[in-house]
Amino acid sequence: MTTEREVLLMVHPDREATGEAAREVSARFAKAGIRIRVIEEDVCALINPDEHGVGSRCTVVAQGDNPAEGVELVFVLGGDGTLLRAAEVARPAGVPVLGVNLGRVGFLAEADSDALADTVQRVVDGDYQVEERMTIDVTVTHAGEEVARTWALNEASVEKSTRERVLDALIEVDGRPVSAFGCDGVLCATPTGSTAYAFSAGGPIIWPDVQALLVVPSNAHAMFSRPLVVSRDSVITVGIDPDGSPAVLTCDGTRPLDLLPGARVRVTCGKTPVRLVRLWDGPFTDRLVQKFSLPVTSWRERHARPVE
């Protein structure tokens, strides 16, 4: 007996921009006999099941009910923000995420919108691979008491909570102090996150298969405030000065948590990875060049004139 296949569809909140793509995806999956699961009821209305013959194949599930449990993969239409939101849903169920970029850079996405039909067909045919990406586990303590636990695929960011104040932070690695300074914030990132916020803050790009963690100070007022690349087995701690200003912790740009003076943010390699679908062969180097439109021809080659 064959188990019916099912895909969880997640789309960018801008329904107007993603509506056409969502309808095409749902229609193609329905034609192939693959059920569509969604979290929000308006997404089911968006894909217009009557017109596209999806009918009862669109199932709405509550987000609190582990909506990715039992699906083959999470199919994402949007940019990296939408994919990060999908990763939150997929990670507890161990389900892979496939992103189709409808935004700008879309570094985490595997395909662009002009390859939508081919991407759906690859899923229908089961013609794809899955790779695991490192995550980070984040624990917040204050006065010796645990305050919160969370995680991130890209980065955990500890930042000053008001524009007028400076964040006084102490960086520790494996229980040993490394540097203390005033700054706008401190980012603790994975190799996946090295091309995101950490890159914008001046951090290096780390290839995804490198097992390491990245610490990037943001606008630090100090002589020694360079990014640090440490072992995946290291424990990174960002301590907030007890006599300083409060801060705020965000993970992957979401889930904000206010930090009181004296709070400590502990970052370690995550126990549970995020699984990403890969469709196309090729090294990360090519993806980097393509996504960032990097010049790969030297000035001399571009301006060389043929010898007559």
Image (cartoon, rainbow, N blue to C red):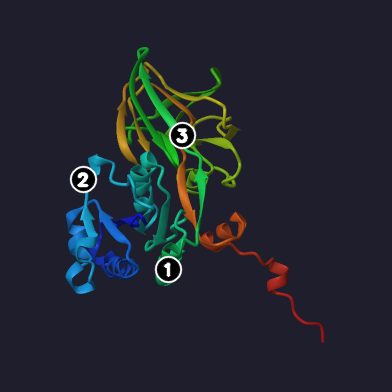
Mark 2: amino acid? Ala
Query: Quadrant location of residue 203?
Result: top right
Q: In this figure, which residue is indicated by the disc labeled 2?
A: 62
User: Residue placed at 18% from the left, 58% from the top?
Assistant: 42
Mark 3: amino acid? Ile
Query: Quadrant location of residue 168?
Result: top left
Q: Nearer the viewer, mark 3 or mark 1?
A: 1
Q: Which of 204 and 133 is in front in this view?
A: 133
> Which secondary structure, mark 1?
helix
> In the image as oriented, which residue stretches furthest toward the right?
308
Q: Specify whether 249 is left or right of 109.
A: left
Report the number of numbered marks: 3
Q: In this figure, which residue is indicated by the disc labeled 1?
A: 121
Q: First in sequence, mark 3 or 1: give its number.
A: 1
User: Residue placed at 81% from the left, 83% from the top?
Assistant: 307
Q: Specify whether 235 is left or right of 18.
A: right
Mark 1: amino acid? Gln
Q: In this figure, which residue is indicated by the disc labeled 3?
A: 136
Residue 227 visible in this rendered orientation of the protein: no
